[in-house]
Structure formats: C-alpha cells, structure tokens
Amino acid sequence: MVSTLLILVPKHELFNPVSSKKSLINYVNNFVELSSEETHQLESSFEEVKVKKRQFIVQPGFTNMHRAFVVKGAFRAYIITNDGQEHTLQFAIENWWISDFNSYIYQHPATLFIVALEDSTILQIEYNQEQELKKSNHKFETFFRIMAEKGLAFEHRRILFNLTNSAEARYENFLLNFPNFVNRVPQYALASYLGMTTEFLSRIRNKRIKKS
C-alpha cells in the first residue's frame, strides 16, 4: 500500500520568527525585495508540512494542488511507463522546488509520482492562493515568472546535454553541478535520471575510483 500521510504543522508554529519559513523568504529575496508586509503576506500563503521517508506528496490520477519548496530533506519525481520502467525526471533538496508542474499549472490529473527520499519538511502553496498572490502584487508575479523561466531553461539545457553527450559525460556533469545530490539519492534513481541502467552507472563509478 502506498503511504501518503502528511503531517501539518500546527498554525501557532507557522509564524514563529525562527520557523522554517525564513529559508523561503531568504530565497525569494534573492529575486525580488519584499517589504515586511509583503513578507507576511507570502508567509501566510504557505503551509508547513512534515513528510516521512517513502511517503508520496503527488500520485498519478490526482490533481497536484500544491507547489512545494523544500526546507529540509530530499524528493524524487518519476514516471512509470507501460512496461513497468521508472524514469526519474527531477530531484529536489533544500531550497529547491518540486511539483508535477503540468498538473499544477493546468489543474489536470498528475502523471508523476513524487516521493520523499528522506524525512522532510516542505512549505506548500495551494494553486488558488498562488494566483491570488500574483494578482495582488507585481513582485509575486515577477518572482513566479522568474521561477518558471529558470525551470524551463534548466530542462532545456538538461535535454540538450543528455542528447549530445556520452553517459560518462552526463555523470561527470551531474557530479560537477550537483555534488550535494549524489550521496542523497538512490543509485537506481540517479541512473534513470541520467538515462542509463544502474549497472552501467556502477561501471562508470568503479572506473572513476580506479583512476583516482
């Protein structure tokens, strides 16, 4: 049975000055400068959720109602094809966003599984709340637009790199750009993200160890 239990943090904890929302505000302020009033408005739109390891926050067939910001922990987004193969599309650790964005943006049933790889804490915003935020203040509209643009550009680069480089080059590129992920994601998940078998990834790793 798939476990989907999410633990909501009590309301009185959400606005604690030392709460996990500080990481979100710091992140947003890298792109748009928020006033104290705008900060409070943004904080009020997000809810803190505790997620246990191996629990799902998104499953196919159910509309993805939230966009999630990872405060603590790690997540994997993947799809299962008709032949039973798993294909990893995204990882997320601290200060990364994760969602089935096609489902979230269009409010259609999800096609992805998103599972916690560790005990995790996320801040999630509901779709309609995000729309209201963007309508209320151009800064929020600007921030979410920047996130969409950065996400699109990242996926474009990833697809091009995967299509034009060897498996070894794809692994080396991942190590170079995302060293914090390597020891936090399962080898089979990393292999599927890089477009290779687990066995082939093991051979690449062993070859690197012998060279070092």
Image (cartoon, rainbow, N blue to C red):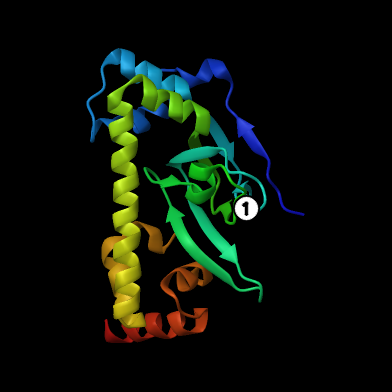
Whether residue 125 sits left or right of residue 94 in the image: it is right
Query: Residue at 67% across / 51% down in the picture?
Result: 61
Q: Position of residue 115 (x, y in %)?
A: 58, 52
Residue 129, placed above or below residue 170: above
**Amino acid type of disc 1?**
Arg
Query: Residue at 43% across / 51% down in the picture?
Result: 92
Whether residue 202 sits left or right of residue 163 in the image: it is right
Badge 1 crowding class, 10 Å Cα cut-off, few under 14, some 14 to 19, many 20 or more, is some
Query: Residue at 39% across / 59% down in the picture?
Result: 181
Q: Position of residue 108 (x, y in %)?
A: 59, 46
Name the image quarter holding the N terminus. Answer: bottom right
Residue 33, placed above or below residue 123: above
- Which residue is nearer to you in this view: 71 or 41? 41
Query: Residue at 32% across / 31% down in the picture?
Result: 141
Name the image quarter holding the C terminus. Answer: bottom left
Residue reaching furthest to the right: 1
Q: Is residue 15 visible?
A: yes
Q: Position of residue 100 (x, y in %)?
A: 52, 50
* Residue on which the image places disc 1: 54
